[in-house]
Image (cartoon, grey):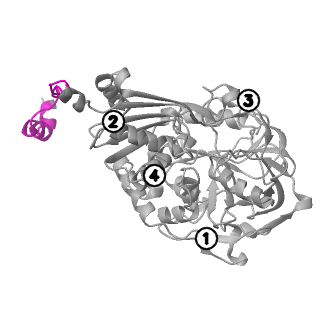
Amino acid sequence: MLFNDLRGFLSYLRKTGRLQEIKAEVDSKWEVGAICRENYNRMGYGLVFRKIKGFSTPLVAGLFGCSRDVYADVLRCEPSTVAIQRRWQEVYKSPIKPKTVDRSEAPCKEIMIDEEEVDLHVDPFPVPTWHYRDAGPYLGTLHAVITQDPETGWTNSGAYRNQILDKNSLGCLAPGYKHIGVQWAKWRERGEPMPVAIAIGLDPYLVIASTSGIPVQLDEYDIAGGIKGAPIETVKAETSKLMVPARAEIVVEGEMPVDSFWPEEAPFGEFTGFMGEKRHNSHYIKVKKITHRKNPYFQGTYEGRPPSESNILRSIGRSNALYEHLLRSGCPGVKDVCVTPGGAAGYHAVVAIKKGFPGHARCVMALTWGYSVLFCKHVTVVDDDIDVWDSAMVEWAVATRVQAGRDVTIVQGGHGGVLDPSQVPSRRAWSDWLGIDATNPVDEYRWDGGEMPPYADSFPTEIIEGVRSNWDKYFEE
């Protein structure tokens, strides 16, 4: 089944029993966030808040739930690691360019709000203060912040947090190692403000693409089209040359200055499960125009520790983005990648390889550390007999194949995520890197004149096949 917009996705989730309606009036200040947190703890599906106090616009959150099944449905594959990885490989090989439509064919243009009338504190923005200690309401938690490289035309679409600072100003976390930061630096060199559009209420393909850490110079529109198997419809923005999703619920247009900054942004409860600290002299967006559909939905998500919708989206998408990066680097023998859910879907990657040469594992570590958009500070490399998505198997490999003095690599002073709570504030964006070679030390054994012990559970094939074929008989009376 294909989804052309958020509304089609909601209809599908409702029909399949994976959408819950909250009809009681709730407060956008903390109560929405607390409900979302409890819903994740219960492994619940998506929520529609019909009555947000003081607003008529409904809010949707958590549509992908906390498991793979909805994600796999969107990809049109089985919810297995192998099937999802195979589907992502097809997408990277066959991206599909977006289709430009006329304004009359773009539902996102049904209602226009001019600059002098902009007020982000009223409909259609029932924006929650998601966490108890947040500095204020955060509009940007599951959306697409759209920018463009002024030299190459490369369009980036990413989910970057956006605090409502005043009625027409939004914060924007745009560090230099993120694609938005790379593009902003080029606009600064030109001495021109960077055009920005924020699309809210998206089809699920754009949501997946915008949260997946797609490799540099690839347009998320093209990847979303590849996931869908058909072009994403786009339309020209009202205030810039940017192309925006024609079927988005809401589009906020503006520009990011290159010569001025907002004095203070945050704190905000982040994907790490910790509060992201205040940032001084922050990038920000001055809003110039808002367009939206009639009777729109506002979409967001509650950030925090796993399980959560955000964790599922980022872990699966970024695992496959890192896998694609390693393949494109020319590194041989890479078999599987997991940017682990428990590692905040960004800080720890496990890579399985078919080891082919001395130092192979360390080559993989270096290439993973170099993929700066993901800031994976910890890398564990295992043999291809280990399921990288099975934390018990990974821990078993570390316990039985690693000697710290031989197999652990520490690199001091690498780049790091600005939200990493393990790093002191004065060293944010810097991190030590840890690499663990948890592959079998066959070369060390050969050097020492011996061989690795055989596996204890290596039964002959005919025995295992016999047990499987007779499985039900074992439990008969």
- Residue at 54 percent across and 40 percent down: it is 311
Question: What amino acid is labelled 2 in the image?
Answer: Val
- Residue at 67 percent across and 66 percent down: it is 151
Contact check, label 3 and label 1, Cβ < 8 Å: no
Question: What amino acid is labelled 1 in the image?
Answer: Glu
Identify residue for label 1.
Answer: 233
Of badges 4 and 1, the one in the foreground is 4
Judge from the rendering whether residue 138 lies leftward or rightward of residue 228; answer left or right. right
Chain-order first, disc 4 or disc 2: 4
Vertical arrangement, residue 230 with respect to residue 320, above or below: below
Chain-order first, disc 3 or disc 4: 3
Q: Nearer the viewer, residue 469 or 153?
A: 153
Judge from the rendering whether residue 410 lies leftward or rightward of residue 183; answer left or right. left
Contact check, label 1 and label 2, Cβ < 8 Å: no
Residue 325 circle label: 4
Identify residue for label 3.
Answer: 132
Q: Which residues are magenta?
A: 448-474
| Circle 4: element type | helix
- Residue at 72 percent across and 76 percent down: it is 103
Report the Cα–Cα distance between label 3 and label 1: 38 Å
Say which quarter of the image contains residue 464.
top left
Report the Cα–Cα distance between label 2 and label 3: 40 Å
User: Is 12 colored magenta in this rendering?
Assistant: no
Of badges 2 and 3, the one in the foreground is 2
Q: Nearer the viewer, residue 336 or 476?
A: 336
